[in-house]
Image (spheres, rainbow, N blue to C red):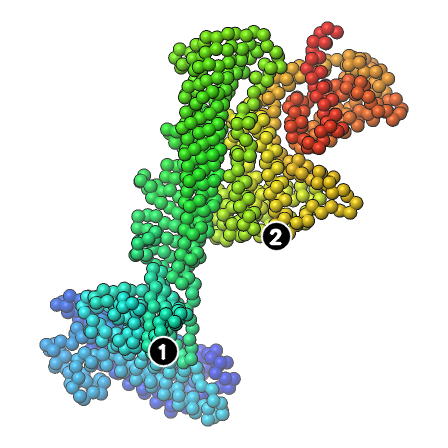
């Protein structure tokens, strides 16, 4: 070998070794030196042919024809042929060099022969070469250079024929086609023949009948070359036969005709088209010069069409995203040919390349998948017109994950089912504002928004709530705080895209909050208006205007009952009650400029109790029934239950997309139920199964506590929404003691509804006997013990306690202030003075519990008596559950009795005359700042079954102590 020394024998064998040895057999397979030399000679002869073709033909074809308008396209095509031609030339040269390296031995290892060792490289360059040549044939590239007037071709015609061994007179086009195909095709046949001879000899020597894999590869390559050439010539003939307009519309270099309804007869029913062409990439229907092209990626084939409709014809149904065709043939074999070819070509189109050989190996067949990734642009009239869909498709319909994009900027990304948006999706709709969009992040059903979602509008307003038929419907929140003209936040019910029903609207510009009924985006029905100054209005509204009589509660605690103007100004007959109890009855007229003008009778005699009731008038009672306030929230949960808690309704109800990828989940972080990595993954079936196991009150409460905190549980969604509406109503401007009755009504209603829903869920979970009574326990007693007050309210209250107790403190602010003055005055007294002042029997004074120092006397110590009872009562502010607060009061009473029993050395039961002064002492020393609010909080929310029992008795006693302490200041001064 020129340019260097041959490799040493050991290194040479290691270098030429191949893992194919283990595949071809355990013993070494060799080729004689004579056979190898002969094969080398054929390679060298082929190189000479390639050199002559390159010099005499290819270089001439590479010269551009300036007169040809399509010369650039043809030149581009022949340049590709030239590139692939030289790839074969280079590879063959490498094969020769490799063979020469091994000719020094008596025999050559079969696996060291280049066409065996590197068959994949040979396969690639030959398939790419024939693909480039056939592309040039299809676009009539050789026809364009075959001009009779060409001096070169005429002069060298006879010499050029020797390259293909042709003596007869042939056209230049045929000559060029043959010169670029026959030598290469023949050389591949030489490879097959050489490997076949080797295989036969090896079989004789070893007695084995197995063939070399390389032989099968080159046999298949021969089939591939024959098929690709046949397809090219057949396609070229088609373009010649069609009109120039059809050819221009259909012809591309790499498109190949596979079947023609003129050759294998088949027709479209109803005579819609007169000819059908099947290409490797598309199915084309022709009617005159009009074409209908169907990409095979979006073609589905169904042979299950009912035969009875087509009598003696054999049908074949073609399904595309917008149309369906039925092909019929009188001959069953024709239908079978079309069906087989369509299935094969669709499968090849989907994987992105043709089979090898083109129609696969003998006996191999496969049907394309019905669900596939596709891209399609809709053209027909309809919602999707001009939209391009990219995503999962099944039987011509979007089905799975996908994206729809319109030319005007609209797009929808999400889940599809049977051709409709179904599941979670994000939809962008361009706004009239530049570069702004309305963004809908919602759940869809049958192509419309249905269920929970969010819309971020172009004007920066945001809606969070439920949709129905593409309209806001049910419970929802619309917030537009970024507006410069009318910033507001509406929380409430919607009907057909309009605010209707019960709702709360806060206007930051007007510094007021409206609580009440709506209709068609306007205040309509009974309602309440609160201002940040403390003024409150209650009355009837119509079309955003105040109508008829109403009530005005002023910030100075005066109350007006009477007629108003549309702007809520006093006008007409009415009654004004001042904060001192005086009343004025007459006619009123108030304007923004002249102030209040009145004519009537002033009454200065009044009862304190009646005046207090007026000052603490409770708004909304009777006018806004609690059952009608937030029925939209409970309605969704009820529908979820009625659906059987199915997964498809769970997703829409809970407001998050369980199956979406991480990127899509991030776009839903605003949803009420956010996934937490610490959460335990759970399906609705697991949740219900766990619920059916809870039978006792303690286990039920434990379950509810976890449910309210679990992002997987439907009850958390419900709790989140209830917290939002409660704060929207009763916090901020709504922290007004005139709303206390409404607030505590709502809390009890929440507990009742959740208890009903909880029981319904248990029944659905298979726990029809969920309230089964254990042996030895009375059923009636158990049913009384398990109710909304005992099971739900203790778990519910912590979520609302801060806002609710603030209303109680505001309501009792004045009484608590008097009470606290009494606490301060009583705090001045020593323990003995206070016990004496309260008329506590000296025999009950626990002085022996007091440990005095050397400088102390009993008469000067403070806060030393009944310490255990005082510390116990102080714990009342650390719990939120009324039942726990009652337990603390009972334990306080018990501690007082224990202390007295220890003093008198007997089991002493305190009579009421002794209990009350001792309880006053304990309450005054405990120093609970808002004791009045605590007492009435317990009264309003405690279990009704506790009324009339020991708890009710002790609570009444504590209330008496509270009232007594308020009046102690006067008595102390008298003492």
Quadrant in which the N terminus appears? bottom left
Place of residue 693 in the rendered image (x, y in percent of width and height, measured from the top left): 68, 49
The residue depicted at 51 percent of the width and 50 percent of the height is 649
Q: Work out whether residue 311 or residue 377 is closer to the camera in this orientation and state it.
A: 311
**Residue identifier under label 2:** 686
813 displayed left or right of 269: right
Rendered view: 804 above or below 593: below
Q: Which mark is residue 332?
A: 1
The residue depicted at 34 percent of the width and 64 percent of the height is 324
273 displayed left or right of 429: left
Query: In the rendered image, is residue 162 in sight?
Result: yes
- Which of pointers 2 and 1 lies earlier in the amino acid sequence? 1
- Residue farthest along the bottom direction in this orientation: 204
| Local secondary structure at mark 1 | helix
Q: Work out whether residue 210 or residue 81 is closer to the camera in this orientation and state it.
A: 210
Place of residue 936 in the rendered image (x, y in percent of width and height, measured from the top left): 65, 25
Rendered view: 25 above or below 269: below
Residue 133 sits in quarter: bottom left
* Circle 2 or circle 1, nearest the eye: 1
Residue 171 sits in quarter: bottom left
The residue depicted at 13 percent of the width and 76 percent of the height is 147
Q: Work out whether residue 487 or residue 544 is closer to the camera in this orientation and state it.
A: 544
The residue depicted at 30 percent of the width and 84 percent of the height is 186
């Amino acid at each position: 070998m020129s340019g260097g020394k041959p490799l040493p024998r050991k290194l040479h064998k290691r270098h030429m070794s191949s893992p194919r040895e283990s595949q071809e057999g355990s013993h070494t397979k060799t080729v004689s030196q004579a056979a190898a030399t002969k094969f080398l000679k054929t390679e060298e002869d082929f190189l000479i042919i390639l050199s002559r073709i390159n010099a005499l033909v290819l270089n001439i074809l590479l010269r551009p024809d300036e007169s040809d308008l399509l010369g650039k396209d043809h030149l581009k095509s022949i340049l590709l042929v030239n590139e692939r031609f030289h790839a074969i030339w280079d590879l063959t040269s490498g094969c020769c060099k490799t063979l020469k390296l091994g000719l020094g031995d008596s025999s050559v290892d079969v696996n060291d022969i280049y066409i065996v060792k590197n068959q994949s490289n040979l396969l690639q360059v030959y398939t790419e070469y024939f693909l480039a040549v056939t592309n040039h044939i299809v676009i009539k590239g050789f026809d364009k250079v075959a001009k009779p007037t060409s001096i070169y071709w005429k002069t060298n015609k006879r010499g050029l024929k020797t390259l293909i061994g042709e003596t007869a007179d042939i056209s230049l086009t045929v000559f060029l086609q043959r010169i670029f195909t026959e030598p290469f095709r023949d050389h591949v046949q030489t490879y097959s023949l050489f490997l076949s001879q080797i295989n036969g000899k090896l079989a004789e020597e070893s007695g084995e009948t197995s063939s070399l894999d390389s032989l099968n590869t080159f046999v298949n390559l021969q089939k591939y070359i024959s098929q690709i050439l046949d397809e090219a010539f057949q396609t070229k003939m088609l373009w010649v036969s069609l009109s120039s307009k059809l050819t221009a519309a259909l012809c591309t270099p790499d498109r190949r005709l596979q079947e023609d309804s003129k050759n294998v007869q088949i027709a479209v029913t109803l005579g819609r088209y007169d000819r059908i062409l099947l290409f490797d990439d598309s199915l084309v229907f022709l009617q005159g010069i009009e074409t209908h092209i169907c990409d095979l990626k979006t073609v589905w084939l169904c042979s299950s069409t009912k035969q009875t409709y087509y009598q003696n014809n054999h049908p074949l149904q073609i399904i595309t995203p917008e149309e369906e065709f039925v092909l019929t043939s009188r001959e069953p074999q024709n239908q079978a040919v079309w069906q087989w070819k369509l299935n094969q070509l669709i499968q090849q189109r989907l994987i992105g390349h043709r089979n090898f050989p083109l129609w696969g190996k003998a006996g191999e067949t496969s049907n394309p998948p019905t669900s596939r990734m596709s891209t399609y642009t809709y053209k027909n009239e309809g919602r999707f017109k001009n939209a391009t869909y990219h995503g999962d498709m099944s039987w011509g319909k979007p089905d799975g994950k996908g994206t729809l994009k319109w030319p005007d900027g609209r797009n929808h990304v999400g889940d599809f089912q049977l051709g409709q948006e179904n599941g979670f999706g994000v939809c962008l709709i361009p706004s009239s504002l530049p570069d702004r969009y309305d963004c809908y992040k919602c759940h869809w059903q049958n192509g419309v928004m249905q269920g929970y979602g969010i819309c971020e509008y172009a004007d920066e307003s945001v809606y969070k709530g439920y949709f129905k038929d593409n309209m806001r419907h049910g419970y929802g929140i619309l917030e537009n705080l970024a507006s410069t003209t009318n910033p507001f936040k509406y929380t409430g019910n919607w009907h057909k895209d309009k605010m209707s029903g019960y709702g709360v609207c806060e206007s930051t510009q007007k510094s007021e909050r409206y609580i009440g009924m709506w209709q068609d985006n306007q205040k309509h029905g009974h309602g309440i208006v609160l201002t940040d100054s403390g003024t409150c209005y209650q009355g009837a509204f119509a079309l955003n205007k105040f109508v008829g009589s109403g009530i005005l509660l002023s910030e100075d605690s005066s109350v007006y009952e009477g007629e108003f103007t549309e702007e809520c100004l006093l006008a007409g007959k009415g009654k004004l009650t001042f904060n001192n109890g005086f009343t004025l009855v007459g006619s009123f007229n108030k304007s923004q400029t002249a102030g209040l003008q009145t004519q009537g009778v002033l009454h200065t005699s009044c009862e304190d109790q009646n005046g207090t009731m007026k000052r603490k008038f409770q708004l909304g009672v009777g006018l806004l029934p609690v059952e009608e306030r937030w029925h939209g929230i409970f309605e969704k949960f009820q529908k979820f239950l009625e659906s059987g808690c199915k997964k498809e309704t769970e997703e829409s109800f809970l407001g998050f997309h369980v199956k979406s990828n991480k990127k899509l989940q991030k776009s839903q972080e605003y949803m009420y139920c956010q996934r937490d990595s610490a959460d335990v993954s759970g399906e609705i079936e697991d949740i219900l199964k766990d619920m059916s196991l809870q039978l006792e009150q303690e286990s039920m409460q434990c379950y509810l506590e976890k449910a309210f905190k679990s992002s997987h549980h439907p009850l958390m969604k419900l709790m989140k929404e209830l917290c939002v509406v409660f704060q929207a109503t009763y916090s901020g401007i709504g922290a007004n003691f005139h709303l206390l009755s409404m607030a505590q009504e709502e809390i009890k209603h929440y507990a009742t509804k959740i208890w009903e829903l909880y029981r319904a869920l248990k029944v659905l979970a298979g726990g029809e006997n969920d309230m089964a009574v254990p042996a030895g326990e009375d059923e009636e007693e158990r049913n009384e013990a398990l109710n909304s007050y005992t099971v739900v309210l203790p778990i519910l209250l912590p979520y609302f306690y801060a806002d609710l107790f603030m209303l109680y403190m505001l309501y009792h602010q004045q009484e608590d202030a008097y009470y606290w003055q009494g606490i301060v005055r009583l705090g001045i007294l020593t323990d003995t003075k206070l016990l004496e002042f309260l008329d506590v029997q000296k025999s009950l004074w626990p002085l022996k519990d007091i440990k005095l120092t050397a400088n102390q006397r009993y008469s000067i110590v403070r806060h030393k008596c009944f310490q255990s009872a005082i510390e116990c009562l102080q714990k009342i502010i650390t719990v939120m559950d009324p039942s726990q607060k009652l337990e603390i009061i009972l334990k306080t009473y018990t501690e007082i009795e224990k202390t007295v029993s220890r003093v008198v050395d007997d089991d002493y039961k305190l009579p009421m005359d002794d209990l009350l002064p001792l309880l006053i002492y304990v309450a005054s020393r405990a120093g609970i700042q808002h004791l009045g609010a605590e007492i009435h909080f317990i009264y309003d929310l405690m279990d009704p079954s506790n009324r009339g029992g020991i708890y009710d008795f002790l609570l009444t006693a504590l209330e008496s102590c509270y009232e007594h302490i308020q009046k102690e200041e006067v008595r102390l001064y008298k003492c």
